[in-house]
Image: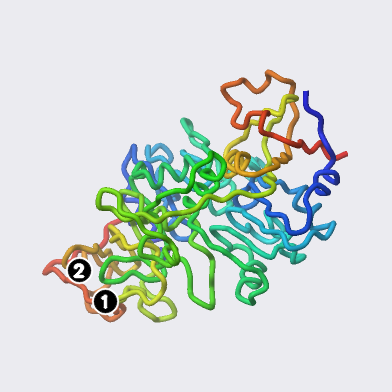
Amino acid sequence: MKTAITVDEAAALIPDGASIMLGGFMGIGAPDRLIRKLAEIGRKNLTVISNDTAKPGYGPNPLLDVHAAKKLIASHIGKSPEAQRQMLAGEIEVELVPQGTLVERIRAGGVGLGGVLTPTGVGTEAQNGKQVVEIDGRPFLVEKPIRADFALISCWRCDYAGNLAYTMSAQNFNPVMALAADVVIVEPHEFVPIGVIPPDDVRTPGAIVDYIVGRAH
Amino acid sequence: MNSKEMIARRIAQELRPGMLANLGIGIPTLVSEFVPENHGVFFQSENGVVGLGHRPPEGMEDFDLTDAGGTFVMAVPGAAAIDSALSFGLIRGGHLDVTVLGGMQVDERGYLANWMIPGKRVAGMGGAMDLVQGAKKVIVAMEHTAKGQPKIVRECDLPVTGVRRVSLVVTELAVIEPTDDGLLLRERGPGVSVSAILEATAARLIVPEMVPEMRF
């Protein structure tokens, strides 16, 4: 059986300068308590990897608001005026990656692949600096894997073995990121006894979950 | 009927029962409002829902269920929830019948630009590059001009979203099909003359003898 740690203990594991993956899509399925705690304790120089920056107050925004990130890797920052402002002002380095490429690069990092060949972005600015290879006469971009020091994810249900299940559009990047970091910290919405999540419905096996954040008291 | 509604209504006619369709943010999202409840088209969104429904009744939102723009929605019977890798596998893998995307510019090659204005607005491409690349059919939904400036141009000066020719461009003034020979004017808006379309367009258009009005 696994035990939970507090959100303070979880945040203390993450040092300044760490690279962190944040699950979530427009803030849905994001580890909100962990994000706010990291912002509150003043972490700096983080590399944040997240699908998008959501709207103000959601997703990674609390970290951006206090300039906790030196680099952001994302597919979309259009709903966050602060992310756009910091990028245009040169206060943060932003790497924009097509969404399907971003998730596959993270997946490659998590499953031991040396990269991905994708047709997405051929002939566009997304091709800049990338190797192009031809497979059966079609051009593909060589996209490198992405890993991080920490994956901060959220899930719907977590059982006492640390098995995770997700719901609806809150799944998004979470199960993919759970494979692609040295340390995986999950922030569940519900805790359930072992067996309540049928084995067929487990999307992230407890074996790869390092820390579970307990309920807020 | 305002411009945006007209565009959305015209594009809704392109959707068939059994199709898997993806709607982008903005005018494209409006399209679903003009598709009857039991139509049979399945809407997919980048965030991993296959079978998006309409908005839920006020106060009955599922906080874990939105469309790709972050708006709370419902799911239709038969819907599926998947992760982002599988969601983009559907998109890139040719499983998506049609995508409807907003546009900043479309040019004579049929190339779309819709993800950034250098130095001004850097939203990021989100899923647009994958959608343009992977969907069987790409429909662009946009107003014909922006602040009086034509958005259908000879060659995009904004960074393009892909180098694939889009399938159809629908504006409040015209339906235009990019072809091997160039941009073919297929339909005109209600009461809109061909000369008015040509005046609002910077690209060369191929104009057939008969250009029927859009029908609703």
Pick whichever of labels 1 and 2 is earlier in the sequence.
2
Pinpoint residue B80: horizontal percent, then vertical percent. 49, 34
Pinpoint residue A53: horizontal percent, then vertical percent. 63, 58
Left or right: residue B185 compared with residue A190: left
Tell me the kind of residue under disc 2: Gly
Viewer-proximal residue among B77 and B212:
B77
Mark 2 surroundings within 10 Å by alpha-carbon count, few (fewer than 14), some (14 through 19), many (20 or more): some
The residue furthest left is B209
Tell me which corner region of the image, top left, top right, bottom left or bottom right, holds residue A48: bottom right
- Of helix, strand and loop, which one carries label 1? loop
Tell me the kind of residue under disc 1: Ala
Picture quarter with the N terminus of chain B: bottom left
Viewer-proximal residue among A11 and A56:
A11
- Circle 1 chain: B
Residue B92 in the image: above or below residue B156: above
Left or right: residue A210 compared with residue A5: left
Residue A46 in the image: above or below residue B197: above
Residue A161 in the image: above or below residue A14: above
- Residue at horizontal 35 percent and vertical 67 percent from the top: B172
Picture quarter with the C terminus of chain B: bottom left
Pinpoint residue A146: horizontal percent, then vertical percent. 56, 51
- Circle 2 chain: B
Viewer-proximal residue among A130 and B60:
A130
Residue bearing the label numbered 2: B182
- Residue at horizontal 57 percent and vertical 46 percent from the top: B66
Q: Which mark is residue B203?
A: 1
